[in-house]
Amino acid sequence: MENYKCKSVGIVGSGIQGVCTGLQLIKKGIPVTIFDRHDPLSNEFKPASYGNAGHFSPYAVLQFNRPDVLYDVPKMLVSSYGPLALKWNYIPQMFNWFLHYFKNCNKKSMMHTAKYMHQILSLSNDAYEEIFQEIDTSGLVEKRGIIYIWTNKNLKSRKLEIKVRDELGIKQKLLTQKEVLDLEPNLQPVFDAGVIYESAMHARDPHGILKKIFKLFLERGGRFIQSNVKALEQVNVDQTVIKTERDTYKFEKTVVASGAFSKTLTDQLGENIPLDTERGYHVHFKDQDKLISRPVIFLDRGFGMTPMNQGLRAVGTVELGGLENPPSKKRIEYIIKCAQELLPQLGKHEDEWLGFRPTLPDFLPILGPSLKNKNIIYAFGHQHLGWTLGAITGKIISGIVAGEKTNLDLSPYSSKRFN
């Protein structure tokens, strides 16, 4: 095993997971080719790595598989002014996902998810810092912390979040309404209290950072083929095949890092993985990014704002509705309404965007070999934390590909849990 060296790797997907994995493999001296139908350097295409909230959120250990959230779901779905929406025509397709979700929505599963999210989240910023040593991030990353605010309406949920983070040793500083306003004086006092995660940072331009990492990958000898991947298979013990629209390529190992689009490939490989899509939206308020000096998330509304180079980005809501449904005007209106509630001085918005978050019903990603094809390795399902987990995923997956030992417990991220 000591002398083993992987001969070649194909990666399906040029989002933050695929590009960071490619870079780490190239650093290990392994030849890599990334495939995607879209060129990451183009400004035409705007994937999740472009449109996210831009937060590096190492504290975000609690997900939606919480008994306290489950109780509120029916109310949220009925209200059009709420953080959660459902495209009713998509319910039949989500049946399997919901089945798994209800099974995972209890205190024990919630703590299991929190523990194993914490295991990788606690390493996430350092993994990025390593990459940032090699690219110029001036004007692209800011380290001013991230603020969450809330009203006294759901205090039980807020206390739960604070308690779990305390137990895991996550640094958090509770703020009164006045302390929040001292930090962000332009906010309307429509909230009661908050918390700041002082070690968190945010991207001023997520796509700009992705492009720099991708360019570094190419400079180091990585290859990119712009083509739509139609199929993959493991043909024997040390060979996988990637079939695109135009050609067939052979690699020793293949990594699937196609985010919300990974399910078509895993279905072909005979694995029944309940991956589905949370649709997220954003708008920009041009030249308004100076109104706040760091990201602010309003928990009651399931929405947040981030100062970015394109302006103030308002993002949010979770809409369950798959990849095919058209964007929902109501969701955009909801985000604008939320933004203006906190900052009434906001003017006209632009750049309405819809993106897809790949979500599994226990809210842990899948990191590791396919059950039936050990040379095909999965790296998807990071839900809201795809951006945060990009660099650490790259390190973990490149280690798996290279057959290295790790002191991390990777079993909770295996696709075994659904099969």
Image (cartoon, rainbow, N blue to C red):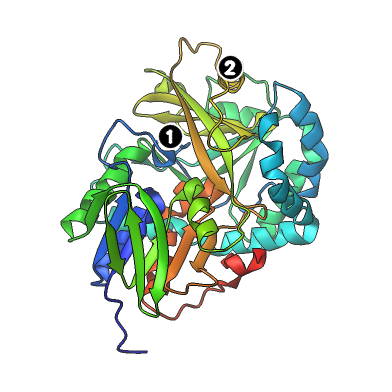
Dot 1 surroundings within 10 Å: few (below 14), some, or many (20 or more)? many
List x then y, in percent, for residue 191: 68, 26
Q: CA distance from mark 2 to mark 1?
A: 17 Å
Q: Most extreme residue toward the bottom, as rendered?
A: 2
> Which residue is pictured at 34% across the width and 89% down the height?
2
> Which residue is pictured at 34% across the width and 39% down the height?
207
Left of 249 or right of it: where is 108? right
Between 376 and 66, which is closer to the camera in this rendering?
376
Q: Mark 2 is on which residue type?
A: Glu
Nearer-N-terminus badge (2/1): 1
State the image quarter where residue 117 is shown.
Answer: bottom right
Left of 374 or right of it: where is 241? left
Q: Quickly name the residue at label 1.
A: 51
Between 125 and 172, which is closer to the camera in this rendering?
125
Whether pointer 2 and pointer 1 mark residues with C-beta atoms closer than 8 Å, the reply is: no
List x then y, in percent, for residue 12: 37, 55
List x then y, in percent, for residue 90: 66, 35
Q: Is residue 65 visible?
A: no
Label of residue 333 in the image: 2
Quarter of the rendering occupied by the C terminus: bottom right
Q: SS at mark 2?
A: helix
> Which residue is pictured at 61% across the width and 45% down the height?
173
Dot 2 surroundings within 10 Å: few (below 14), some, or many (20 or more)? some
> Which residue is pictured at 20% across the width and 54% down the height?
218
Position above or below: 234 against 45: below
Position above or below: 389 against 24: above
Label of residue 41 in the image: none
Q: Mark 1 is on which residue type?
A: Gly
List x then y, in percent, for residue 329: 57, 18
Left of 353 or right of it: where is 179? right
Q: SS at mark 1?
A: helix
